[in-house]
Amino acid sequence: MKDKKQYIYVAVGVVLLGATYLLGMTQGYYSRISANNFATVFKSELEGRKLGEVDLSLLWDVIGTIDEKYIGTANYRDIAYGAIKGAVAGVGDPYTVFSDPEENEAFFNSLDGIYEGVGIEVEITDGALLIVAPLAGSPAEEAGIRSGDLIVAVDGKTVVGETLDEVISRIKGPTGTSVKLTVVRGEEEPKIISVRRQVIKRESVDTTIEDGIARIRIYRFAGDTEAGINRAVDQIKRQKVDKVILDLRGNPGGFLDAGVFVANEFLSGGGIVEERFKTGEVAPLNADGKGRLQDVKVVVLVNGGSASASEIVAGALQDAGRATIMGTQTYGKGSVQEVESFPDGSSLRVTVAKWYTPKGRSISDEGITPDKVVELEDNNEADLQLDAAKELLNK
């Protein structure tokens, strides 16, 4: 990450509270917390303290009681992280997330496209796990998992009451093992789908050129996206292609700078996105006028799994009249998370702003509505959306 903080934009999240004091304590005191001095450290820091009108001495009382009476051996490291996670849960924002070192490493590995699991992008919603999108070619997709499915149990155990990181940790596992997901789809009865885990590793950008049309498929906006787009542009320029399909279907988002880089390639100028902060500050991000694909004809494909940075790109090109947006309504994830990394390897992803398109549309409230709605048919193996995009470009 760049320095200590970095803006990231993802379609996944768990709840936690921006408890400045508690998080600061984790950074400053974690290295001194042990089984022997945990209670002393917490007592000296929390006793008499208040968070707003809330007296934090209750937390000390609970910790002290555990320290005094619990018959087993308490894992004070887990207690420390659990106290922070429990504290931040009170904010009620699914995108503000505290991750312990293991969870933090797994999160950023998944953004880079490397992890052992089933290959799904997910969101906690109403006591279930919403499938934003199964990754193309993943074990989940091959097993029949679809965008919009709800996972209500993992290996027979309900997900109700668990954070996103907790559920994901149960879904992930060693390559070759299997996990049983209880899935609800629409009004259908729940069904159990067994998915075999494997190493999920792939580049974020895939480009093919066929019949004079380039299809740039971006699976997520990651650290390798810029390099992937550079390769795509080189191919397009070398083969003198002037028709492009930018396929953002099932792309849950990722890093803001990667999304801005992609949008910039198609624009001759103007806005890309606005960030609006709690203070009222508005930070516009604009195209630099150097886009190498600003003269090609473009169709952008989106669906309900297109979220976050995908919506920024689609919204920018739509507002500029630069592309035809085709497919189905996008997810509607338009909040900005700032990452604060701590010395022990843990991190806080905290929502600090909202995104708006250049014309002032709220991505969170509205998502992106396609210029041309094209649905996929359940029993039709043909990619009707891709076919419609090609047909439009060839007119």
Image (cartoon, rainbow, N blue to C red):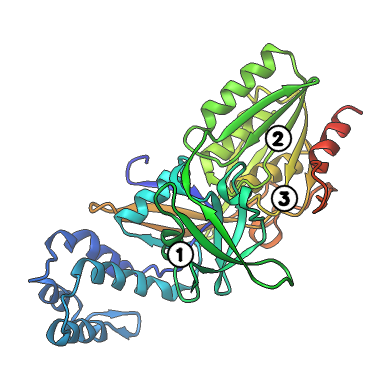
Name the element at disc 2.
strand
Residue at horizontal 68 percent and vertical 15 percent from the top:
237
Q: Amino acid at mark 2?
A: Leu
**Contact between labelled residues 1 and 2, with CB atoms less than 8 Å apart:** no
Q: Is residue 32 above or below residue 49?
A: above
Measure the C-alpha gap from mark 1 to mark 3: 25 Å
Is residue 276 in view from this perspective? Answer: no
Is residue 148 in view from this perspective? Answer: yes
Q: Residues within 10 Å of mark 3 (few under 14, many from 20)?
A: many
Measure the C-alpha gap from mark 2 to mark 1: 32 Å
Q: Residues within 10 Å of mark 1 (few under 14, many from 20)?
A: many
Residue for badge 1 = 167
Report the side of 101 relative to 236 (left or right): left
> Where in the figure is residue 3, as x and y percent of width and height?
33, 41
> Where in the figure is residue 378, as x and y percent of width and height?
80, 54
Of residues 75 and 59, the one nearer the viewer is 75
Q: Quadrant of residue 187?
A: bottom right
Name the element at disc 3.
loop
Report the side of 68 relative to 333 (left or right): left
Label whose residue precedes the other's in the sequence (3 or 2) = 2
Q: Amino acid at mark 1?
A: Val
**Contact between labelled residues 2 and 3, with CB atoms less than 8 Å apart:** no
Residue for badge 3 = 303
Of residues 321 and 31, the one nearer the viewer is 31
Q: Quadrant of the C terminus?
A: top right
Label whose residue precedes the other's in the sequence (2 or 1) = 1
Residue for badge 2 = 246
